């Protein structure tokens, strides 16, 4: 590979330096502060909003941002936290609502997640700051739409959609895990200092999608199921 990949989070760090690689982009910090002020003034669930914004700070300010330049597995962690942890916390904390049906948002988000983890679009996303933020904004925006629409959906329908999301995430993870060749060009030269071949790093990322990421949607489905059954359990025998 004759190209040096320098995505938004910077050149891939070495293990000896990555903990010092904080990102103090003033635009990102200002955006998080403004979002925090907005959440505070709305008077919504401030705890959830604070946790969601803290998750965004972890993703875009902490050394995890730089680590995702080196390892595909770290990038997967980044995207899972963005879409399945930060997004629902922000929806709850800010009281967000979304236009359109939940099935539309589920399909749009799943499609975007698959697209951005295909080799070509993934490489494009790490080729410039503009492409990087296009990826992040579309993933977060579609995730916010999905989780916001899910809030107003009947529990039985929500459970079904969450289980579908779990299955599609697991399927994508399995396809990546069992690929026989490294597919992600930005990481072909960045994984060796971390003790992984590009294929091993790719397999780690696939396994993260396959198990922990899928488990987040399963957990959300179980929570909705528990909520659906709670009134019946509360009735006298």
Image (tube, rainbow, N blue to C red):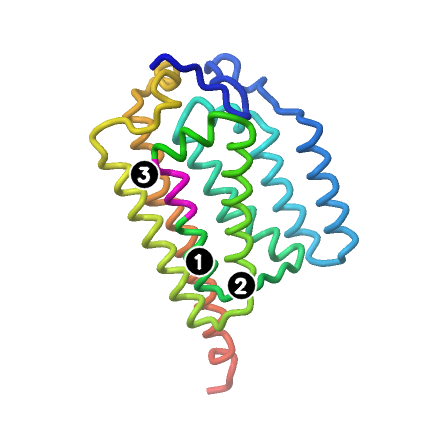
In the image, 176 versus 136, the foreground residue is 136
In this figure, which residue is indicated by the disc labeled 2?
149
| Pointer 2 or 3: first along the chain | 2
Circle 1 — which element?
A: helix
- Residue 5 occupies quadrant: top left
**Disc 3 element:** helix
| Quadrant position of residue 93 | bottom right
- Residue shown at the point (54%, 20%) measured from the top left: 10
31 up-or-down from 201: above or below: below
Q: CA distance from mark 2 to mark 3?
A: 28 Å
Q: Is residue 232 left or right of residue 174?
A: right
- Cα distance in 3D space between marks 1 and 3: 22 Å
What is the secondary structure assignment of the residue under circle 2? helix
The part of the chain drawn in magenta is 112-118
Pointer 1 local density, CA inside 10 Å: few below 14, some 14–19, many at least 20: many
Rendered image quadrant of residue 148: bottom right
Between label 1 and label 3, give the one nearer the viewer: 1
In the displayed structure image, the side of residue 75 where residue 198 appears, left or right: left
The residue to which callout 3 is attached is 207
Among numbered discs 1 and 3, the one appearing first in the sequence = 1
Disc 1 marks which residue? 106
**Residue 21 image point, x, y percent:** 57, 19
Across and down, in percent, residue 155 comes to 47, 71
Residue 60 or residue 231, whichever sits in front? 60
- The residue mark sitting in front, 2 or 3, is 2
Q: Residue furthest left?
A: 180
Residue 136 — which label? none
What x and y, as percent, mark residue 15? 46, 15
Task: Tell which circle, 2 or 1, labels the residue nearer the N-terminal end.
Answer: 1
Inspect the magenta stretch and tell me whether residue 122 lies in it: no
Identify the residue shown where x is 30% and y is 29%: 183
């Amino acid at each position: 590979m004759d190209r040096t990949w320098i995505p938004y989070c910077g050149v891939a760090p070495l293990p000896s330096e990555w903990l010092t690689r904080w990102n103090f982009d003033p635009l990102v910090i200002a955006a998080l502060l403004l979002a925090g002020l907005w959440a505070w003034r709305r008077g919504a669930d401030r705890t959830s909003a604070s946790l969601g914004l803290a998750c965004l700070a972890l993703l875009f300010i902490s050394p995890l941002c730089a680590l995702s330049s080196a390892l595909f597995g770290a990038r997967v962690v980044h995207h899972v936290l963005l879409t399945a942890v930060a997004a629902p916390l922000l929806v709850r904390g800010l009281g967000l609502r979304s236009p359109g049906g939940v099935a539309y948002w589920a399909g749009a988000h799943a499609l975007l997640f698959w697209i951005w983890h295909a080799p070509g679009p993934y490489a494009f996303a790490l080729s410039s700051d503009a492409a990087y933020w296009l990826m992040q904004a579309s993933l977060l925006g579609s995730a916010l739409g999905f989780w916001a629409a899910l809030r107003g959906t009947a529990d039985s329908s929500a459970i079904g959609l969450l289980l579908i999301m779990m299955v599609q995430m697991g399927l994508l993870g399995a396809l990546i895990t069992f690929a026989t060749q490294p597919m992600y060009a930005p990481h072909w030269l960045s994984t060796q200092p971390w003790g992984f071949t590009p294929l091993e790093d790719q397999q780690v990322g696939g396994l993260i999608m396959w198990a922990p990421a899928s488990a987040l949607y399963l957990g959300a489905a179980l929570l909705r199921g528990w909520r659906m059954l709670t009134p019946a359990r509360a009735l006298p025998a």
